[in-house]
Image (cartoon, rainbow, N blue to C red):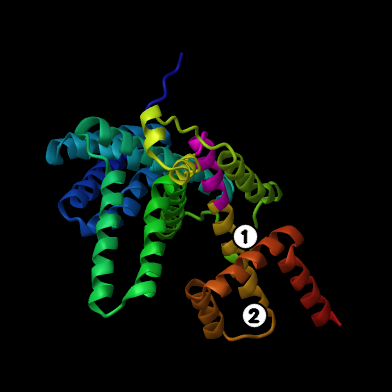
Amino acid sequence: MTTRTIPVRGLTEGAILAALVALFTVAATVLPVAGIASFYVSPIPLTLLVVRHGARVAVLAALVAALIAAAVGGPLTGLVIILTFAPLGIALGAMLRSGRPAPTALAVCATVTTLSILANLGLTLAISGFNPISTMLEGMRQGQENAMRFYAALGMRGEQLEQVSGVMRQIVELMPRIIPLLIVIGGLTTAYVNFEVTRFVLRRFGFSLPALPPISSWRAPALFLWVLPLGMLLVWLASASPAPVALPGETLRMLPPDDIAAIARAPASRYPGLQTLGLNLFILAQMVYALLGLVAGWVLLERYGAPRWLRWMAVAFAFTAPQLGIAVFFLGLADAAFDLRGRWRAARAAEVSS
């Protein structure tokens, strides 16, 4: 029976990189501005250890880093390494070490990051009773009130002020229902940035890592075309099943029929979970098709020789002009359904060859 030992060089590098992870994590807790950067830098030493020496060395280094961080910054600082940095760094290192394609590595890292975010939220709520989501929503409501006071001080009155207030109120009311989508987007964005930063750093150490396909070639899977109608169907089914409103007899005798009808027809769903799922799927599809529309518009302008500054200006207008944003969404939907970019490239190749 043979036992696998860890090389001395691996132990030495693991100790040094574990100290780096602990240093980055503690710095993030002491220097709030460094927190964002540390989120993308701290997993890199663990990824490097997995690529060079395997997952065992990285796991051991993560435990040592957590102990150091806990001794310096407290137990919660050590838990941040265990729940956040270690899973992402080790998962990315395992994907790169096994030679997985870049899209597969990104998908695995996004899943790990999303689970880490959920674990951090649950642990924070269980230990301290602090709910960061409620704090965020309360901050948004206070921001809405401050913005309304600011607009009123500028002289905005009447219907215009009510219109702006209504839009802000809808956004604040929508936010609690799309928290699952925001967590998924946060996990995907964090994994993408960390993947690119890790590739950049590891190239300095002589490692050739697979790159993601260029954005101009990104496409949604064919099955994703059903996400938009599925989300709309779930929202409709939930809205078509209003929750029953049981009013006491005394209330029924006191209220006029119009008030009773208004209460009974209040926008309360019998299936709020189904409605939330449908709403998240619907907004996810809108965001994906909007992104594909921007890419398709970029490719189309590039085909006709539009300068780069004009293409960036079109992207900026798509974010500021609602009508153009709607057009971009439908362009992305058409591109996903009919492969417009593939047709344009084929037509361009035919023109060049002829």
Q: From which residue to which does the magenta span run?
A: 269-282
Residue 304 occupies quadrant: bottom right
Q: Is residue 317 above or below residue 102?
A: below
Q: Residue at x 26, y 51 (%)?
A: 138
The residue pinned by badge 1 equals 218
Q: Is residue 278 magenta?
A: yes
How many residues crowd mark 1 within 10 Å: few (<14), some (14–19), many (20+)? Answer: few
Percent position (x, y) of residue 70?
17, 36
Foreground residue among 231 and 343: 231
Left or right: 219 with respect to 12? Answer: right
Q: Earlier in the sequence, mark 2 or mark 1?
A: 1
Identify the amino acid type marked 2: Leu
Percent position (x, y) of residue 89?
39, 43
Residue 252 occupies quadrant: top left
Secondary structure at numbered mark 1: loop
Secondary structure at numbered mark 2: helix
Residue 330's disc is none
Left or right: 48 with respect to 78? Answer: right
Q: Residue at x 41, y 63 (%)?
A: 167
Q: Is residue 34 above or below residue 324?
A: above
Identify the amino acid type marked 1: Trp
Foreground residue among 23 and 31: 31
The residue pinned by badge 2 equals 301
Dominant SS in magenta: helix
